Image (cartoon, rainbow, N blue to C red):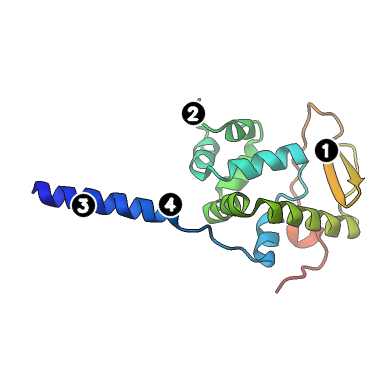
Amino acid sequence: MKTIARLLFCFGLLTSLQAQAQPPREFNQAELAALLAPVALYPDALLSQILVAATYPDQIAEAARGGQSSRWHPAVTALTAFPEVLARMAENPQWLRDLGDAYLGYEPYVMETVQQLRRRAEAAGNLQSDAQRQVVRQGEIIVVQPVYPQVIYAPYYNPLVVFGTWWWA
């Protein structure tokens, strides 16, 4: 009986190590655009918290249920100030995991895709400064920031509309 238990333990350990050793899933540009479209127009401070928090999907799910924890990652804790954002993140666990995986494995491509999406929204007339946010161009980079730093507005927008005609099949 002890031998079987040891074998099961070793198999479990080996399986765990293999799972950790697997390379991150690869995302093509169309997948990155689809993953990032729902959050790309948020203010930069909120977007950065979302991307980091997405790497902790179990904590996001717990926080969205109204849980309290002092052991959550600081990005997850920061998002508790935005319950609607947490709820939208938690309602699609696969999207959340993919977003976290994309950010962990391909951060430069994720950030460039955000800029591409912002440029498309700007060109379609759907990304401009208003009473809640300030949109500033710094060369090729589009920065979105709140008008009042202590108040961050997280608008809901329809990704199928705000970027103009969707360019991927």
For the residues labelled 1 and 2, say whether their Cβ atoms are less than 8 Å apart.
no
The earlier-in-sequence mark between 1 and 2 is 2
The earlier-in-sequence mark between 2 and 4 is 4
Q: Quadrant of the C terminus?
A: bottom right
The residue that label 2 is drawn on is: 71
Q: Residues within 10 Å of mark 4 (few under 14, many from 20)?
A: few
The residue that label 1 is drawn on is: 145
Disc 3 residue type? Leu
Marks 1 and 4: which is nearer the front? 4
Q: Is residue 158 left or right of residue 126?
A: left
Pick whichever, 162 or 119, lies toward us. 119
What number of labels is visible?
A: 4
Q: Is residue 99 visible?
A: yes
The earlier-in-sequence mark between 1 and 3 is 3
What's the residue at 89%, 37% (across, down)? Answer: 131
Pick whichever, 151 or 3, lies toward us. 3
The earlier-in-sequence mark between 1 and 4 is 4
Mark 2 lies on a secondary structure that is: loop
Mark 4 lies on a secondary structure that is: helix
Alpha-carbon distance for marks 4 and 3?
18 Å
The residue that label 4 is drawn on is: 20
Alpha-carbon distance for marks 1 and 2?
29 Å
Mark 1 lies on a secondary structure that is: strand
Disc 4 residue type? Gln
Disc 2 residue type? Arg
For the residues labelled 3 and 2, say whether their Cβ atoms are less than 8 Å apart.
no
The residue that label 3 is drawn on is: 8
What's the residue at 40%, 55% (across, down)? Answer: 19
Q: Is residue 146 left or right of residue 70?
A: right
Q: Residues within 10 Å of mark 2 (few under 14, many from 20)?
A: few
Marks 2 and 4: which is nearer the front? 4
